[in-house]
Amino acid sequence: MFRKVTKQLQIILPILLGTAIYAFGLHYFLIPNMLMEGGVTGIAVLLNYAAGWPLSITTLVLNIPLFLLGWRTLGRTEMLYTLAGIVSLSFFLAVMEQLIAKGWVVTFHTSTDYILAALYAGVTLGAGLGIVFRFGGTTGGVDIIARIVSRRKTLSMGQIILILDIVIIGGSLFFIPIEKVLYTLVTVFVAAKLIDFIQDGAYAAKSFSIITDKGTSMAQRITIEMERGVTLMPAKGAFSGQQKEIVYCVVQRQELRRLKAIVRSEDPRAFVIINDVHDVLGEGFNEE
């Protein structure tokens, strides 16, 4: 029981951290400079600009029916971390609203350098959402709609989210100048790149596929000298008909030179394919 609770906390706490960073980015960089955001949060931002409705309440109210729909359609397990994301986001938005109202936090507002505001908004929003997504959570909204629609239509989740974001950001043209919408595209781009980096690129390894005549001796050296697991696969040259072996292994970035040196010394004529690996689970690598 204790281990189960600990494991849940290891997922919930990063989601809380991610939503706190996301809420900070919205109130500190985005709202003061009248930039936009996609998804349900974007609708809440739009209502804030148009009617002054607080972001914390609007976000929660808009997400409740979507969450109930997702709970029935997608199942309880899948929606558990989404609930954590929705509730914690509304909570931290409310905290930021109170801190700003009391003057304890002075937001970043500029009338000249909107590109700086757009960049930092993208960094904070992307960092927050990246952490949330990395640990299996979401902040609700269009993510739920996309999951449901993608099960019934040929469109992917990414395509559905993109279409909805375009509609929401496009609708903001009625309330904010077109220049702000263009700066918003910078924010969205930076946020998307940072989300991808945190989800896939924060840890990067390299995979080697080595086609050689000396697979056994090469595998032994890698195993002994680098203490890395190696897989040997039989291969046959299509043109020459010669029997060869494929040595496959994954190493950390700092071990790249070392492995190349072993390959060159064992078989200078080996054909080597090196690929980026964004996440690795197993002995010697990340354990989740």
Image (cartoon, grey):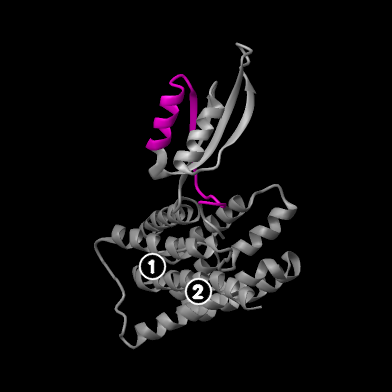
Numbered-mark total: 2
Q: Nearer the viewer, residue 217 or 113?
A: 217
Q: Nearer the viewer, residue 168 or 273?
A: 273
Q: Amino acid at mark 1?
A: Leu
Residue 207 in percent (x, y) is at 51, 39
Which residue is under mark 1? 30
- Whether residue 235 is visible here, answered yes or no, is yes
For mark 1, give the secondary structure: helix
Instruction: Write down the region rendered in magenta.
Output: 257-284
**Residue at the location (38% across, 67% down)?**
30
Residue at the extreme left of the image, as rendered: 112
Q: Residue at x 31, y 80 (%)?
A: 105
Q: Is residue 275 magenta?
A: yes
Label at residue 10: none
- Foreground residue, 268 or 179? 268
Q: Residue 239 falls in which quadrant of the image?
A: top right
Q: Position of residue 182 (x, y in %)?
A: 39, 55
Relative side of 67 to 17, left or right: right
Quarter the C terminus occupies: bottom right
Q: Which mark is residue 16?
A: 2
**Residue drawn at (61%, 14%), measured in percent from left and top?**
242
Amino acid at the residue labelled 2: Leu
Q: Which class describes the residues within 10 Å of circle 1: few (<14), some (14-19), or many (20+)?
A: many
For the view shown, which residue lies furthest in the bottom direction? 102
